[in-house]
Image (spheres, rainbow, N blue to C red):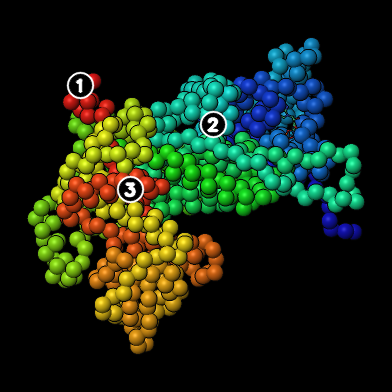
Amino acid sequence: MGRIRILPDQVANQIAAGEVVDRPASVVKELMENSLDAGANRIRVEVEAGGRRLIRISDDGQGMSRDDALLAFERHATSKLRTASDLLSIATLGFRGEALPSIASVARVTLETATGEEATGTRVEIAGGKILHVDDAASPRGTTLAVADLFFNTPARRKFLRAESTELAHVTALVTHYALAHPEKHFELISATHTIVSAPPVARTAERIYQIFGKETLAQLLPVAAETPLAHAGLPEAPPWKKDPDEPVRNPGVLRLSGFYSKPELQKLNRNSIYIFVNKRLIRDRLLMHAITEAYRNVIPPTSFPVVLLFLEMPPEEVDVNMHPAKTEVRFRQQSLVHDFVRDSLRTALIKARPAAGFLAALDSAPAASPSLMPPAASPLPGSPQSAPLPDSDFPASQSAGADAETFQLTPRVPTPFPDTLPFDPRVLQPGGWESQDQKAWGEAAAALFQPASLPVEEGCSPSPGSAPDGGPSPATVTAQVEAEQAAANLNQLGSLRPLAQLRESFILAAGDDGLWIIDQHVAHERVLFEKILRDRQVEKVQRQRLLMPLLVELKPWQMVVFARIAEELALNGFEVEPFGPQTLAVKAAPVGLEGAALERMLAEVIEQSSSDSEEPKQNEYLTAIRTRIAASIACHSAIKINTALDPVRMGWLLSELGKTSHPTSCPHGRPIALLYSWKEIQRAFHRI
Ligand code: ADP
Ligand code: MG
């Protein structure tokens, strides 16, 4: 007698449920997807006890006939697919016919549904996979599914559920995501008697963001939209001898992108505020994540992340959604095209908008200082590996949401009172600026003693420090109104600003039509040089200068190894370096403007930064990384220092050169360059409006 058996349906369903349904939020996800697939315009989600006791979802979609209502609970019963080739172009959110039987196998389910075309509707009760009752129901067109006592018959699963509030947070995140993807539909989430989400239909995504997250969040975001015709369809064409002559020529279609992205001064510690929707399905995708990071490269610090809501639309044949049990990962058939399109569209938008940072917003730019859009609880997509519950523990959010956890939750900011005074204090804008005069003097003296000719301590070219200075207002103090006004200001007019004076020989004050500007002379010049170096490098026209005396640099053996890796790129940037003994290099020429101690420290810096690179020297990306790193380092070390007097002509020159750069908003390390104290803010501060 053989030992192999076919599993009974109920067991098979429970196994499937293990993949598809792991917590209340995943039930909500599947049921909302069904409602959307049924063409519903109004979806109401009610939960009790975080969804553990009850989840009820009602929609006004097309409903089901009695036969369909019964069939829907069969395994692999679906109205969305017929043949295997349909799998190649899935336009619905669901397609496997697994959700309802899976859910019904681990909960007590009541379905009420009507098509609106028959005299009566249908009511089906089913528990633990067994149909208990089938009755008439007098329901209007649409479907209501109530799922009670989730996991009542699978105690092991039930034990893994977390606190009600945690489960509710996950459900909320999910409803929020679908609401964002469908602004034209009405979404409600009610927990017990509490309305958590109420989003009536609106015309545009911007209004939906406003409804859900409020004015402040919206004000920090800028819209982006782009499209490109696809050159060819992602699926291969049938060979000519197999082609049906009557078949119409396939139109490759269009790739469309729309959404919102954050200004450079808004920076997050992790990816939690990046949302990617493909054909209205929220997904997690490394490729697109990478494209977004690339778009922000050298605009925000490498350790920070922007806020991005990205909606991609493409013909369904272009994307394989049948990859992941919970359908949260996809594969693009034209991967690099999609990647480059996203990167370039975002970058172009960033360059065009050149948003000016307001004083208050700039205080928010250190990533650690802006927890606003961070989730209160880790919320990976249900079904994702990270969402596996931890036994008997209820981790607070921050512990489980590591920097790499790709969670998907955006929570509204909690407003705090507006400060009495506007923090119009340049000290807070400059790392190290909090030092008292004495400390500063001491620092300079010490630097002079131990590091002859070194830069002042606060010159630092490294990314902005991880936290804002104490005493600065919290990010939430930026009122929405102020933000909204700032949204309009941009840096296009930098070139026409009138330089007024220099503040402590470090910051340029300039007057413009929309207010008073303060420009950090060092980072401004750094940005100008950075873009020039990259440009010159591109056409191999770097200006180099011979040093009167070769500079001898001593390196440790491991530094020699790193140097060998980047030597070629250094040469292309104007360096001429020869070995001078086993552990010494002789630098004979260097880029113009870089000499002495600055040159020495620049070299030490790139070697240090390159030492942690994983060794894949031939990869394009690695080369680009090295190239920009070297350019940034040269720029930083040869730019005008702070504590350097500038005459009006040079100030004017710097402003106009800055105005010509593509990213005058932030230095290559992500620090803000120019801040605007807007006319509105000034008037308000003087109580004139
Ligand atoms: P899938 O969504 O993959 O097709 P499901 O198990 O989620 O599988 O649902 C099975 C079928 O039940 C669907 O194909 C659909 O025809 C029907 N159905 C489920 N929910 C609804 C709903 N809210 N309104 C109308 N039909 C529904
Ligand atoms: Mg479904």
Residue situated furthest bottom in the rendering: 581
Judge from the rendering whether residue 474 lies leftward or rightward of residue 384; answer left or right: left
Rate crowding at label 1 as few (under 14), some (14 to 19) or many (20 or more) other CA atoms within 10 Å.
few
Q: Relative to 278, does residue 524 appear above or below in the rendering?
A: below
Question: How far apart are the two marked residues, 2 and 1, measured between alpha carbons?
Answer: 39 Å
Residue type beneath disc 1:
Arg
Tell me what residue is drawn at x 12 percent, y 51 percent.
436
Question: How far apart are the two marked residues, 2 and 3, measured between alpha carbons?
Answer: 37 Å
**Upstream in sequence: badge 2 or badge 1:** 2
Residue type beneath disc 2:
Leu
Q: Nearer the viewer, residue 632 or 326?
A: 632
Quadrant into which the N terminus falls: bottom right
Res 180 label: 2
Residue 329 coordinates in the image, percent (x, y): 63, 47
Contact, mark 2 vs mark 3 (Cβ under 8 Å)? no
Tell me what residue is drawn at x 17 percent, y 43 percent.
501
Residue 198 coordinates in the image, percent (x, y): 50, 22
Q: Nearer the viewer, residue 608 or 537?
A: 537
Residue that carries the numbered disc 1 in the rendered image: 688
Res 658 label: 3
Q: Secondary structure at mark 2?
A: helix
Tell me what residue is drawn at x 59 percent, y 43 percent.
283
Image region (quadrant) for ligand 1: top right
**Upstream in sequence: badge 1 or badge 3:** 3
The quadrant in which residue 233 appears is top right
Rate crowding at label 3 as few (under 14), some (14 to 19) or many (20 or more) other CA atoms within 10 Å.
many
**Upstream in sequence: badge 2 or badge 3:** 2
Contact, mark 1 vs mark 3 (Cβ under 8 Å)? no
Q: Secondary structure at mark 1?
A: loop
Judge from the rendering whether residue 620 lies leftward or rightward of residue 247; answer left or right: left
